[in-house]
Amino acid sequence: MMDAINKRVSYDIGCMKSLRKLPDRVSLKFMELMTRYMSDPSANGLNLETVEGAKDSSIKSLRVDQGYRAIAFEVGRDIMFVHVNEHDKAYRWAEGRRVKLDPSTNRIRVIEELDATTVEAEAPALSEPRLFAEVADKRLRALGVPEEELPAIRTLTTIEALDAAEEDFDPLTFQVLYALAAGYSDEEVYALTGVADEPQEVPAAVEDGLTFDQLIETEESRQTIFIPESEEELRRVFEEGLEGWRVFLHPDQRKLAYRDYNGPAMVRGGAGTGKTVVAMHRAKHLADAIKEDPARAGQRVLLTTFTTSLAHDIEANLRTLCPDHLDVRPPRIEVINLDRWVSQFLKRKDFAREVAFFGEARDRLDQIWQEVFDDHELPEGLSEPFVKAEWSQIVQAKGLTDKRAYLKASRAGRGTPLDRRKRATLWDLFEDYRARMISEGLAEPDDAYREATDILSSEAPNLPYAAVIVDEAQDMGEQAFRLIRAIVPETPAGDQNSIFIVGDAHQRIYGRRASMSSCGIEVRGRSRRLRLNYRTTQEIRAWAVSVLEGVSVDDLDEGTDTLRGYVSLMRGVAPELVACASEAQELERLVAWVRALPADQIQLADIGVLCARRKDVERVREALRAAELETVVLQSGADDRSVPGVRITTMHRSKGLEFFAVAIPFLSDGAFPPPGALKSAVDPADREDIITQYRSLLHVAATRAKKALRVSWSGSPTNLFGGSFQR
């Protein structure tokens, strides 16, 4: 933020981390100081003082109160706060630190410059083998480690010592070291850190020509440096608690979210890679542009997803990231799931039929089907469930409205073949069902999407949307994407920044599929993949990926996707796989597990129990409540983590959530997949699709866990466990 006397205040991520370890009163006092400092750095009592003995003359201190000091670097017009601690500890921390302008990694780095002679003198006392003894200095420098930190690196003996020394290293250096200790290749380290492959040596003349003012603006520096745009934004970050997505983005993420595209764009990536984070920042970026241009007043960004609950979660998070765009009237960002948007749009257009999403209307459709089956003879070898699936997966999904189109339509993925005669017979049945549905004043969701698309295409209504952002795209069907294309059609002026899609077919849990290009959304050349899992440990990620072993998935267009290169930086404990004698014992041991989690490290609200069936949610709730443990059952609304209690919900509802620790109970062979789901299969191909959906569902549930995953069953475990499972 720039003020009247031309000073810009920023915060290194190390400042945020140091505050977390201090008493709340110190954090509050620092917040008060920073608010005043952003208003007027020259105010009485806000003078920066030189740190005596510091190696960098730009390092300064600021008094927080009688016992605490804040450390900052003052370089030209910039003041960057980097650390807060007790008086003596803060000064000791500051003495060896300096700002390094690093053109080879395109970022500002705060490093500790140790005396190599002193380090070497202390090194012989270490009898254990050195952790990075086999990693040459040249290789470390190529990966982005500064020369000044090499002496300290050579003293490390274990990964535990590396963990303990995290604050002694620049964040990029720590990432590189941790990845090497975890066994990652150089190629994977480059992907993890965002450093260009084999960065070139930079001539001293170039380094001398760089300024702090230039480097602090780079995408790489913004990964670890926060520049608040207002006092309100600063206060929001400090009061809400720092979460990585709110302020800091990996360079790859920032490049995707904060740029212009000359057409629709798509971002894919495994669970935990930050796709929804990128979508939210993309919405902020586009809304910022609307705010800055008076000529665009009234325009908005539509951020839509498949489920109501995920839309609520995203809106709650956006209210932390950029509340001004949601609170203004009209809002510059509108968050709504697509079913609800369609319902509201058709209501404004006086659509005469009720859309049967659920409830009595849906029950009436089932009755209409039965009436149709009573009046028609099915072709030999076909069942009623098969016919209903053919209607849903082929006729409705592809928007077929006449017999000729159905006779020619591709049925790829449907296991039971149909000759022309059988298709013709089925079409007569489908026509009857559609006619009865219309006469009853009902419509299916795909009908609603198609009707809305037709209205938009024919009337060209004056919608306020400058762009549409789609989250969890893998769960939407073809008619949904045709509608999205109609909401923001390509214009004579072009298709710039029109549609931004994020998704991962490995997490498809509703069985819907769509090819972007077949829906008029051309993303080729503007499709990117995220590979770094920010949420889960490598051990949890590997187990969750093993569940999908042998499953082939699409890339949300007309190709195939892969999880190759999908990695986690964090290491942790292996998932806990627990066999029980009975479901009653499962519940008893689940309660014991919750009680055993360290209360000083994890709150009840950061524990999630995820179930395949709604009835199991109630069973878990009753067991925890009987043990006098607070619980919160999550349904469609946003999850307010300020409300205490273990979170219990379905695997489906868990999409978009994350927890420190996750338990997934009742994964026995007879319970998962649920028997009813398998019985609904109309042929072997359909059964295989159902099994794949439940593999994806288990994968989604497992990847909600950040640090601890517990999986349990009674009797024999489900055969959906991957190749890494060992009893």
Image (cartoon, rainbow, N blue to C red):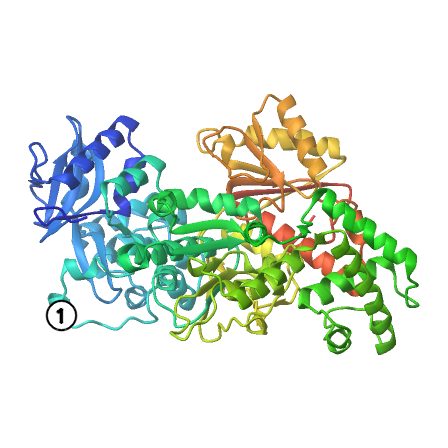
Q: Amino acid at mark 1?
A: Ala
Seen in the picture, residue 375 relative to 96 is either above or below; the reply is: below
Residue 535 in view: no
The answer to whether residue 143 is left or right of residue 416 is left
Q: Is residue 558 visible?
A: yes
Q: What residue do we see at 84% from left, 73% from top?
A: 424
Could you tell me which residue is drawn at 53 percent across and 32 percent down? Answer: 597
Indicate left or right for 94 with 630 as reference. left
Q: Nearer the viewer, residue 589 or 495?
A: 495
Category of crowding for the residue at label 1, using alpha-carbon neighbours closer than 10 angstroms: few (below 14), some (14–19), many (at least 20): few
Considering depth in this image, is 382 or 65 the residue closer to the camera?
382
Residue matched to label 1: 204
Q: Position of residue 441 (x, y in %)?
A: 72, 52
Q: Is residue 136 left or right of residue 356?
A: left
Vertical placement of residue 514 versus 308, above or below: below
Quarter of the view holding residue 259:
bottom left
